[in-house]
Image (cartoon, grey):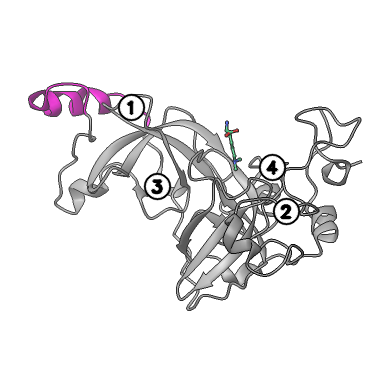
Amino acid sequence: ITGHFSWEKYLKETGSQPAPPHCFRQSCSPPSNDYKIGMKLEAQDPRNTTSTCIASVVGLTGARLRLRLDGSDNKNDFWRLVDSSEIQPIGTCEKSGDMLQPPLGFRLNASSWPMFLLKTLNGAEMAPAKSFHKEPPSPTQNNFEIGMKLEAVDRKNPHFICPATIGEVRGSEILVTFDGWRGAFDYWCRYDSRDIFPVGWCSLTGDNLQPPGTKVAIPKSPAPAAGIASGILRGPKTLLPGVPGRRRRKPGRKKGQLPKALVHQ
Ligand code: MLY
């Protein structure tokens, strides 16, 4: 393997600061992940959040579970923290007087749901109550500032957690920008989103932190070298000579290889 990503080195190289842990709706000591593949639990259907469904743990990564709703296909897996308020032990729904629902896109005829439910729960290994952790409280206000570094779920590829930077702050919302990906994966979310983590989270939980992308950012406003209104005439995405836009790889660096600065020696 090539060298892994080092926050320490990266923060120095980029001259940036991590967002302080109190900015996040995350526990300062991450919850333990005591689940096992195959265990069943109740989960909110992400595609129909008023439904409580049966889910199976199909994967484990750091403090997260990869879940699949029973009766659904394998194309709609989703990830939840073990301290998510959207998961609960089997039996919780019934105790509250509600009924377990088939997932959106239930593979069988709706009329076969009661029998399917019976069969899927019969002999199932249910995740024990002690493996569910209380969701941490939300910070009382948005304490993020532009430029702060963090770790964030790539919502287009939610199994990935990646180095990111606060790009903008607007009221309760923040723009999460992914380092080295030219904006392609950026998103807005609330400051108390469960998809964002303090620097060092993945190393604490044993989750896998992706290295930053290697794509060079397109500058927001071109350097004012080519005269007044050049930006207007050319449009914002046109590259001016001397602006570090789409640079070629340095000679000697192979395609897909990280720049030296990003590799832990
Ligand atoms: N196959 C995808 C993966 C991109 C993932 C980007 N994340 C990590 C920000 C692609 O190359 O587009």
Mark toward the viewer: 1 or 4: 4
Amino acid of disc 2: Leu
SS at mark 2 in the image: loop
Are the residues at dot 2 and dot 4 in contact (C-beta closer than 8 Å)?
Answer: no
In percent of width and height, residue 55 lies at 34, 35
Q: Is residue 110 above or below residue 97?
A: above
Circle 1 residue? 124
Q: Is residue 40 one of those drawn in magenta?
A: no
Q: Mark 1 or 3 closer to N-term?
A: 1
Circle 3 residue? 129
Q: Measuring 31% from the left and 42% from the top, which residue is drawn there?
A: 42
> Which sits in the foreground, 223 or 117?
223
Q: Mark 1 or 4 closer to N-term?
A: 1
> Which sits in the foreground, 170 or 92?
170
Amino acid of disc 3: Ala
Q: Measuring 84% from the left and 40% from the top, which residue is drawn there?
A: 259
**Residue 193 visible from this viewpoint:** no
Q: Residues within 10 Å of mark 2 (few under 14, many from 20)?
A: some
> Which sits in the foreground, 91 or 142?
142
SS at mark 4 in the image: loop
Circle 2 residue? 240
Q: Quadrant of the N terminus?
A: top right
Q: Is residue 16 above or below residue 171?
A: above
Circle 4 residue? 213
- How far apart are the two marked residues, 3 and 2, measured between alpha carbons? 60 Å
